[in-house]
Each structure stands twice: as structure tokens, then as C-alpha cells.
Image (cartoon, rainbow, N blue to C red):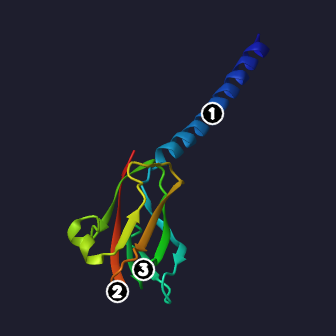
């Protein structure tokens, strides 16, 4: 009888010790999950020139800087004459842990408006539409920027065009 009682006590002690280890493991796992903080970090990560077409003797060129913690592109282009073209790809990367949606890419000045469009004529700027694109965490989206000098019968003169693009995003 004493032997059975001692065996039961030993089994209960082993059960309590196993439960304590299980509780420790569960507690550590729950703490790690609670310490996880969702982050939202979407920005321009890279800009690269994909093509340059020379329509005159001089090569067109552009300068692009990523500013404002990756939320803006500060650009300037110089096109010398008809058929000059510059093409760039800007990468928008989601470095956070939450999915993000691109609300808009804001142009400043907005060369689609007539008053600004006339100031750079015959040059046109086109930007690919990424509005509404969902970017999963760790993924990216490419934004294409093309600046083109339309040939005209009038005298071709060099055009210098400043442009800023701002990124407007929200979490999903």
C-alpha cells in the first residue's frame, strides 16, 4: 500500500513538473507574439534609367534623387530636341509587415493641367498608373516614367523640366 502511494506521489510530481515546463514554453511563445509590432513602411527604394534616345547631337539626361525618407522623387530632365526620350523605372517597396495600397502618385507641378502643359510644350511626361495597387509585405511595384520631346516644325530648343513625385499610400 505504501509502495502504491509513493508511486502515485512520484507520478503527480512528474505531472506537475511537465505542466510547469509546458507553461514556460507557452508563456514564452505568447510573449513573442505579443511583442510583434506591425509596421507600415512603403517608400521608393530605387530608380534606374532604362533607356535614353538621342534625337539630336546631344544626349538627353536626367537627375533623380529619392528624398523625404523615400516618399518623394526629386527629378530634373534636360531634353535637347525632337525625338529625345528618357525612360526610368522607380521601384516602390513595402518594407513593412502590413499590406499597403497605393492611393496615388502626386505630381508637382501637374503637367497634365493645361497651364503647366504649355510651359513644357512640346515635351510630354507620362507616368504609369499604379493607383490602387496592393503591395504585400516584402514585395514591390514598378513605376515607369517616360519623358519625350515631340518633334515639331519649329526650331527645337533645349528644355529643362523639373518634376517631383510624391507617394501617397495607406495600409490595407
Which one is nearer the viewer's eye here, 94 or 60? 60
Give the mark nearest the N terminus, 1 or 2. 1
| Residue annotated with mark 2 | 155
Q: Which residue occupies the extreme top position in the image?
A: 1
Give the mark nearest the N terminus, 2 or 3. 3
Q: Which corner quadrant holds the C terminus? A: top left
Q: Residues within 10 Å of mark 1 (few under 14, many from 20)?
A: few
Can the viewer see residue 149 in this picture?
Answer: yes
Question: What's the distance in space between the residues labelled 1 and 2, CA to CA?
Answer: 82 Å
Q: Residue at x 56, y 43 (%)?
A: 28
Q: Residue at x 62, y 33 (%)?
A: 22
Q: Residue at x 72, y 22 (%)?
A: 11
| Closer to the eye: label 1 or 2 | 2
Q: Position of residue 45 (x, y in %)?
A: 49, 66
| Residue annotated with mark 1 | 22
Question: What's the distance in space between the residues labelled 2 and 3, CA to CA?
Answer: 9 Å
Q: Residues within 10 Å of mark 2 (few under 14, many from 20)?
A: few
Give the mark nearest the N terminus, 3 or 1. 1
Which one is nearer the viewer's eye here, 35 or 114? 114
**The residue tagged with tag 1: helix, strand or loop?**
helix
| Residue annotated with mark 3 | 82
Is 20 situated above or below 87? above
Is 48 situated above or below 56? above
Q: Position of residue 106 (x, y in %)?
A: 31, 62
| Callouts 1 and 2 close, C-beta under 8 Å | no
Amino acid at each position: 500500500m505504501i509502495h502504491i502511494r509513493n508511486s502515485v506521489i512520484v507520478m503527480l510530481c512528474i505531472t506537475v513538473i511537465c505542466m510547469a515546463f509546458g507553461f514556460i514554453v507557452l508563456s514564452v511563445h505568447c510573449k513573442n507574439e505579443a511583442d510583434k509590432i506591425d509596421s507600415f513602411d512603403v517608400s521608393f527604394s530605387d530608380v534606374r534609367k532604362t533607356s535614353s534616345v538621342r534625337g539630336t547631337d546631344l544626349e538627353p539626361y536626367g537627375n533623380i534623387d529619392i528624398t523625404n525618407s523615400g516618399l518623394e522623387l526629386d527629378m530634373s530632365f534636360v531634353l535637347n530636341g525632337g525625338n529625345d526620350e528618357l525612360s526610368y523605372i522607380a521601384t516602390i517597396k513595402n518594407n513593412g509587415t502590413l499590406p499597403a495600397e497605393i492611393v496615388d502618385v502626386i505630381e508637382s507641378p501637374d503637367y497634365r493641367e493645361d497651364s503647366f502643359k504649355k510651359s513644357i510644350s512640346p515635351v510630354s511626361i507620362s507616368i504609369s498608373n499604379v493607383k490602387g495597387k496592393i503591395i504585400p509585405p516584402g514585395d514591390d511595384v514598378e513605376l515607369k516614367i517616360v519623358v519625350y520631346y515631340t518633334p515639331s516644325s519649329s526650331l527645337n530648343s533645349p528644355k529643362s523640366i523639373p518634376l517631383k513625385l510624391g507617394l501617397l499610400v495607406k495600409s490595407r
